[in-house]
Image (cartoon, grey):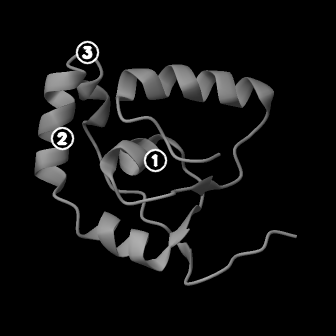
Amino acid sequence: MIDSPHNPSDTMKWKQQVESKGSVKYLINTESHEDHFLCDFFFQVPVIAHEKAREGIINSDLKQMLGVVALKDPAGFPLLKDYKLNVPSITFSQNLTFI
C-alpha cells in the first residue's frame, strides 16, 4: 500500500476496502507530510520510506498534527486515543528493489 489517508474516519473505510482484496504486507510513505503517514498507525505492517522521509516523520510535531485531525475529523479523532507513530523500519537512500 502507498501512503495512508490523513483522517482516521477515511482510513477505517479505506482499510476495510483494501483488506477485502487481501492483506497489506508493507506500507510505503512517499514523503514526510502528515497527510501521507499520519494514519500508518492503523496498519501494523512494516513501513518503507526514504531515509530523509523517515527523519521528517520522526521529527514531526505530533501535537500539532493531532490538533489538525481534531478539527478536520472530530468523529474520527477518538480513534487516535493510543496513537503512536508507525515509523518506517525499512529505509533507502537512493534505490530500493522488491523481488
Write down the quadrant of residue 75 in the picture.
top left
Indicate which disc, 2 or 1, sits on the residue closer to the N terminus. 1
Tell me: 88 left or right of 25. Answer: left
State the residue lying farthest toward the bottom. 93
Which amino acid does the dot numbered 2 rest on? Answer: Leu
- Gap between marks 2 and 1 measured at Cα: 14 Å
Q: Is residue 24 left or right of residue 41?
A: right
Residue type, numbered disc 1: Asp
Q: Residue at x 25, y 21 (%)?
A: 73
* Above-or-below relation of 15 to 54: above
Mark 3 and mark 2: Cα distance apart in space: 13 Å
Query: From mark 3 to mark 1, how far is it between C-alphas?
Result: 18 Å
Of the two numbered discs 3 and 2 on the same chain, state the one appearing first in sequence: 2
User: What quarter of the picture does the C terminus occupy?
Assistant: bottom right
In what element is the residue under mark 1? Answer: helix
Q: Position of residue 21 (x, y in %)?
A: 79, 28
Query: For residue 9, which quarter of the picture?
Result: top left
Question: Which quadrant would residue 59 be assigned to in this image?
Answer: bottom left
Give coordinates of residue 4: x percent, y percent: 49, 41
Tell me the element at label 3: loop
Which residue is label 2 attached to? 66
Q: Position of residue 20 (x, y in %)?
A: 74, 23
| Above or below for 63 versus 46 | above
Residue nearer the viewer, 39 or 2: 2
Q: Is residue 12 visible?
A: yes
Q: Residue under label 3, please give it.
A: 75
- According to the picture, the residue beneath numbered tag 1 turns out to be 40
Q: Is residue 41 visible?
A: no
